[in-house]
Amino acid sequence: MSPKRSVKLSPPPKTAAGPRSIQSVAYSLWEETHIGRGIKTLFKLNQPKGVDCPSCAWPDPDPEEVSKLAEYCENGAKAVAWETGYKRIAPPFFAQHSIRELVEKSDHWLEKQGRLTEPMVLEENASHYRPISWEAAFSLIAEKLNGLNHPDQALFYTSGRTSNEAAFLYQCFVRQFGTNNLPDCSNMCHEASGKALSETLGIGKASVTLADIPETDLLLVLGQNPGTNAPRMLTSLEKLKRNGGKIIMVNPLPETGLIQFRNPQKPWEWVGKPTVIHDLHLQVKLNGDLALLKALLKMLLEADAAGKARTLDRTFIRQQTSGFEALLRHLQEVDLHQLIEASGVPVEKIREAANLLASSKKIIIAWAMGITQHRNAENTIREIVNILLVKGSIGKKGAGTLPVRGHSNVQGDRTMGIWEKMPDAFLDRLGKAFSFDPPRHHGLGAVGAVEAMLSGQARVFFGMGGNFALAAPDTAKVFQGLQQCELTVQVSTKLNRSHLIHGKTALILPCLGRTEKDISPAGPQWVSTEDTAGRVRMSQGDLEPASTQLKSEVAIVCGLARAVLGKDNPTDWEGMSVDYDRIRDKVEEVIPGFERYNQRARVPGGFYLPNGAREGIFHTDDQKAKLTVNPLPADSAPKTPFTLMTIRSHDQFNTTVYGYDDRYRGIANSREVVMMHPEDMAEYGCKTGDRVKLSSVFEGEKRILEGFQVVPYAITRGCLAVYFPEGNVLVALGNRSGESQCPASKYVEVHLKRMNP
């Protein structure tokens, strides 16, 4: 096959943001929405009592430090332009375009058609969606759900954009229906972080706030690309650098956002020298991070044994941790040279990093999916914790853990109970608050949900936002599983692939966007979210809705719950659907830390949830932070010539593709590319633009991606990169962590073959 678009290359820029970001924002607003409507929303974005950005979960500054000009980033502005656009998808659109025709369109084209305006149904064997009333849609879902042999035959997915209020009611409805099948996007990104951090520190969240970052001596950024995925982080990194702090970048490829930065809010910085962000780049092999961290730990212990002052915080280790002696014995046994070789990083650079760690008192380690999406992700994260603990860099200002969450409320959804394994204490309180007995057996996560659909054990899929068809790994099997369902339902703002890869019957339920007014019979309503740092704040849109037929996520959940659970169900779904204060009152009864929820969330800046690790209090079985032994995987050497990772471009957010350019990597006009080291290209006889065939083999099954164009890139030799979600076709369902079941999308063993012209 030939690529649909020919790639165009230019040298990657050396500096992130600056005036180019402003130009990109302006163009997005001009192209997608009415300029006045877009600008109005941007001035309210991330402001106290404004609109929480529907893009990433990066924390907002304290109210007195919020920029009144622009407390948003380029990708946040694109998300707003995408949501507030002037185009609409009304029933005539679906009458004109059949499913067969729409399937052939690109994902970019689908979402670019505009906002969905009213409920639509695709009946069994039909070729086109047609309009359906909300009442009829709820009745259809109720009929299908109540006709199942068991509630566990239904799956209820949640994306990270769902508000606290909607998520809380959603999980309550699902558990009253009788199942814990609550897969969510966290299953596919930071599930490993939550597991490893909960085990070692007693809480699965970041232990630092935004204010800690400029105060640290040393920040390590592992497997994360803040310039694209959390651009507002660059402002904090700029402050850190100006305060004299150091930054180490650990990544298989250089990322512009961690090289140099020009603050787009400060025109006087657009000329002259930009802020240099990183002091050291450790260019690891894919999944070489655990070996690197272990090598750094071993060097720290050697320096401490040699008598170098203050290398380790022995007092903290003795008083606040357990497991040090076992860790010490393990590190004495491992071979440093083998660790260095496994990491792929030259020894002199590792020693330079170890010296920076040794001389720093306050250390923050940040990471994202470059760490979590591996088969041994939990071991790597526990090793991150080991480094922080031996340095005493937990529970004090300017030090701690920083898992950088992706979607805007993915962390809040988990806090609200969107998890297939919620503990009994939560279920006890939920049952008491709503007078029912919640199911206790664990439900299915995202990967398990796909397997259940494939086996026929799951017959109904309900998606509260997101684009599960493309977000989940092993695309062909995900498509097959969804198509085997009796019913698929998608709550959405825009058209995407999940509406076209459907069950025998399919529904589209259009909802309000976060930027829009939510007016109920009781008056204007607002919702809340939780950011990466654990702060809860209110969000209230002020734009006229894209259609009078739209319902809020809360109203959809409440209407669905009443239809499914019946008139005799005692929960006040009608009251909560019109007065969200009643929802928050119930949250208070169920979730610790939400005392006086309604009052505190109305205060500008909101409030922080309790965080023991931030305070140096560890809610583990022995009340101490745990140092752990984390062996390297026994089969760490790849069985194929290359390992491959999926990555995001600068012009996308999760599965939403805003355009075909990746400005920070100098790749334009196409996403059908394979990034490859120039020396590997020469060895395989590949020239720029040559088409190649990639094949992955996992447990005897082969998956193929072909026709993509090779482009030279400064990636570690033996490693390849393709864009997400296009590369998901190569990620096997079974290629995942054994602990958290998180897909190993950053470590896919592949063969590469040049195709004939």
Image (tube, grey):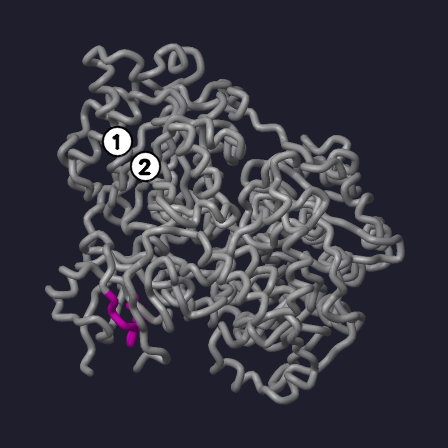
- Residue 636 place in picture, x, y as percent: 22, 46
**534 w.r.t. 299: above or below:** below
Q: Is residue 135 within the magenta segment? A: no
**542 w.r.t. 507: above or below:** above
Any mark on residue 248, and which?
Answer: 2
From the viewer's side, name the closer residue of 456 and 500: 500
* Residue at 45%, 52% in the rendered image: 18
* Residue at 43%, 38% in the rendered image: 237
SS at circle 1: helix
Magenta span of residues: 701-711
* Residue at 70%, 64% in the rendered image: 511
Query: At label 1, which amino acid type do we have?
Result: Ala
Is 475 positioned to the left or the right of 528 in the image?
left
- Residue 91 place in picture, x, y as percent: 70, 82
Any mark on residue 161, and which?
Answer: none
SS at circle 2: strand
Check the picture and name the quadrant holding the N terminus.
Answer: bottom left
**661 w.r.t. 582: above or below:** below
Marks 2 and 1, the one that precedes in the sequence: 2
From the viewer's side, name the closer residue of 497 and 519: 519
- Residue 686 place in picture, x, y as percent: 16, 70
Is 268 positioned to the left or the right of 700 in the image?
right
Residue for badge 1: 353
Q: How crowded is mark 2: few (under 14 residues within 10 Å), some or many (20 or more)?
A: many
Q: Do the numbered discs 2 and 1 sit on residues whose CB atoms are within 8 Å?
A: yes
Q: Main secondary structure of the magenta part?
A: strand
Query: At label 2, which amino acid type do we have?
Result: Ile
- Residue 543 place in picture, x, y as percent: 74, 61
From the viewer's side, name the closer residue of 44 and 373: 44
